[in-house]
Amino acid sequence: MIKTKDAGDNIVVYLRGRLDVHMSGEIEKDIQKLIDENPEKSLIVNLSEIEYMSSSGLRVLVAVMRILKTNGQNLKLCHLNAAVKKIFEVVELMDMFDIYETEEEALRT
Amino acid sequence: MKETNEFKAAVSEIPNITAFAERIMIHWHLDRSTAYDVLLAIDEACTNLSTHAKTVSGEPVMITLKMRKCFGFLCIRIMDNSIYYDIEKAPQPDIQKNLSGEKEGGFGIFLIKTLMDRVKYKRTNHGNLLTMIRRVR
């Protein structure tokens, strides 16, 4: 379901397609498994191939951030398209997440 | 083009519901940003029904989606046969409680109210009627 890339202290997670209620449960399970297997790593979620996201997707990202923070790790998001960015803005979550334009920038910071 | 359709209120039906709405909006040549907002509002309303709604008799909850465009407005009607639930009375999402894990979600109704120009709820003889209005170019 999810594609990943090991990048030192981080794992880059590539999500694609629709992040709606239909898909979010499966994606949440996959990410949870990834965190359980790599508790010492932070995650960078690359959203460049997400064509659609509803509040169900948002809920998953909030849950992932919470789990990582509990483990002392971080969640960074990158490559948000205009539609996805708008959802974050509407629910006023932009400041709560570490959001980067590109994956390179997220890896550098 | 068919502008009304009935769906079972189920998570697995959400992609079909949004695909139906998307086809209509493509047919109407709605701009991408407006179409996305409308799609999201429909998705959120139907997701709520699919995950929370129940009928008194235990029979499946059915959703009828009706879309109309006239005089520069898009009117979306979502009818269902479930137990009374007034979307207008839903509380604001609590971001801090979401971040602490005390509460999950609650963003859907807030998104609907923010993205649409007008949201109306009415209890009918058959169930609930949610009307969402969005100004279009």
Image (cartoon, coloured by chain):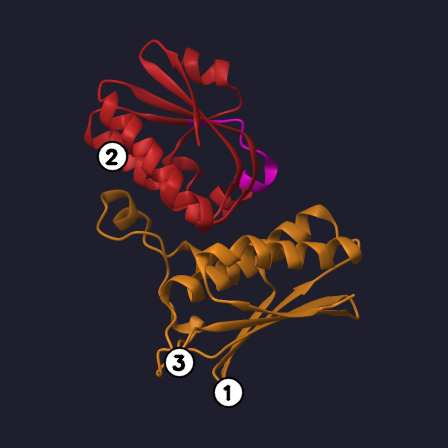
Chain colours: A red, B orange
Res A62 → quadrant: top left
Circle 1 sits in a helix, a strand or a loop, which is it?
Answer: loop
Circle 3 sits in a helix, a strand or a loop, which is it?
Answer: loop
| Residue type for callout 2 | Ile
Residue where numbered disc 2 is placed: A67
Residue where numbered disc 1 is placed: B124
| Residue type for callout 3 | Tyr
- Residue at 38%, 13% in the rendered image: A6
Q: Are marks 3 and 2 in contact (CB under 8 Å)?
A: no
Left or right for B98, reference B23: left
Q: Position of residue B97 (x, y in %)?
A: 26, 50
Discs 3 and 2 lie in a common subunit: no
Q: Is residue A78 magenta?
A: yes
- Residue at 31%, 40% in the rendered image: A63
Discs 1 and 2 lie in a common subunit: no
Is B47 situated above or below A76? below
Query: Which residue, as the protein is rendered here, is positioned at the far top?
Result: A8
Quadrant of the snapshot with the C terminus of chain A: top left
Q: Are marks 3 and 1 in contact (CB under 8 Å)?
A: no
**Which of these two is toward me, B5 or B121?**
B5
Residue where numbered disc 3 is placed: B84
Q: Is residue B68 magenta?
A: no
Numbered tag placed on residue B89 in the rendering = none
Quadrant of the snapshot with the N terminus of chain A: top left
Circle 2 sits in a helix, a strand or a loop, which is it?
Answer: helix
- Residue at 50%, 87% in the rendered image: B124
Mark 3, other Cα within 10 Å: few <14 / some 14–19 / many ≥20: some
Q: Gap between marks 3 and 1, in whole Å?
A: 9 Å
